[in-house]
Image (cartoon, rainbow, N blue to C red):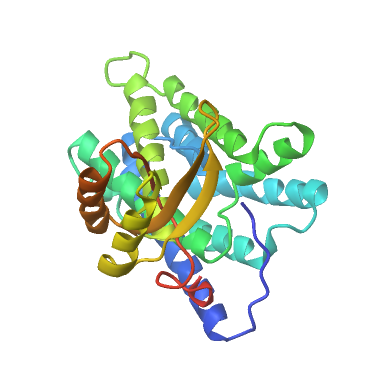
Amino acid sequence: MAFITKEKFLSNEWLSAYTYLIVGSIIFAVSDILFVVPYKLAPGGVYGIATVLNTMFSWKISYCTFAMEIPLVIIGTIILGPRFGIKTIVSITTILVTVWVMETFISPDYAKVIADPMLNTIVAGVFYGISIGLIFKSRATSGGSDIIAMILAKFTKISLGKLVMIVDGIIVLFTLVQPTETGAIGWEFAIYSLIIIYIEGKIIDMVVSGASYHKTVMIVSDNYESIASKIKNDLKRGATIFQGTGAYSGEERKMVYSVMSRRELEILKLHIKEVDPEAFVNVTEANEIIGKGFQSLNED
């Protein structure tokens, strides 16, 4: 989840990467201060821990985060080597400075800009997702729990993705120690934080890979030629025909593989229904498609 890239200084790739990085970092900081901190939420990361500390002891978010980020970067560099790159440092610094400016010079009247807790949670998830997605598109990471997960991954057999979820899940549990207006355990803080994490993940995928408007389809049918012809001639899409053997019957069968839009898929399904109602059709989301007719590798 950390990247080291060597874009040529001031090249289009360099300018694009740092634009994504700085804009994403600023959006993250603003989102945290406007939508997360006022509701005492902690959707993972060191900023989640900082929110809990801010709620309980009135410590500044920027100071708490600085006290955690710097040691994490140093320890991570010692244990993992220089894997983070200058852009991760730039991201961490930009977020810290923006948060400090907002805490220091902006009136606290910003608290609870959106009155409804659920609407606020949705907005926070969307903006968090946009910000982290932009940072990822710059081939960087915002540090924090990512570094913790990478350190744990070095000494365990657990995948990095699972470790990030575990670390962020534990941080979410910290919200339970925060006082509520009624004095009860703050389950609502944890629930809203988990909703933010879920929405954030979906938005990150959309920002990094684009909205999923396409489907991957695989059809097993005796009328594969008619189906492939429909895809090629009417839908103007490419298709690949594979040779397969049924595990149960032992018979050789042909499989047609293709990628197309949702609208095109519905047209194809009607054709399959006409020529072979017994066909086996498997449809999955195509989150990222690179190649002729779709996104070029030069644009990635």
In the rendered image of this protein, does residue 217 appear above or below residue 17?
above
The x and y percentages for residue 135 are 50, 61
Residue drawn at point x = 44 percent, y = 62 percent = 24
Task: Name the foreground residue: 273 vs 286.
Answer: 273
Task: Name the foreground residue: 63 vs 44.
Answer: 44
Residue drawn at point x = 43 percent, y = 37 percent = 43
Q: Is residue 212 visible?
A: no
Task: Name the foreground residue: 98 vs 234.
Answer: 234
Residue drawn at point x = 49 percent, y = 26 percent = 174
Is residue 81 rendered to the left or right of residue 284?
right
In the rendered image of this protein, does residue 21 appear above or below residue 72?
below
Residue 147 picture quarter: top right
In the rendered image of this protein, does residue 46 appear above or below residue 239?
above
The x and y percentages for residue 184 are 33, 13
Q: Is residue 52 visible?
A: yes
Task: Name the foreground residue: 71 vs 194.
Answer: 194
Residue drawn at point x = 32 percent, y = 24 percent = 188
The x and y percentages for residue 226 are 32, 56
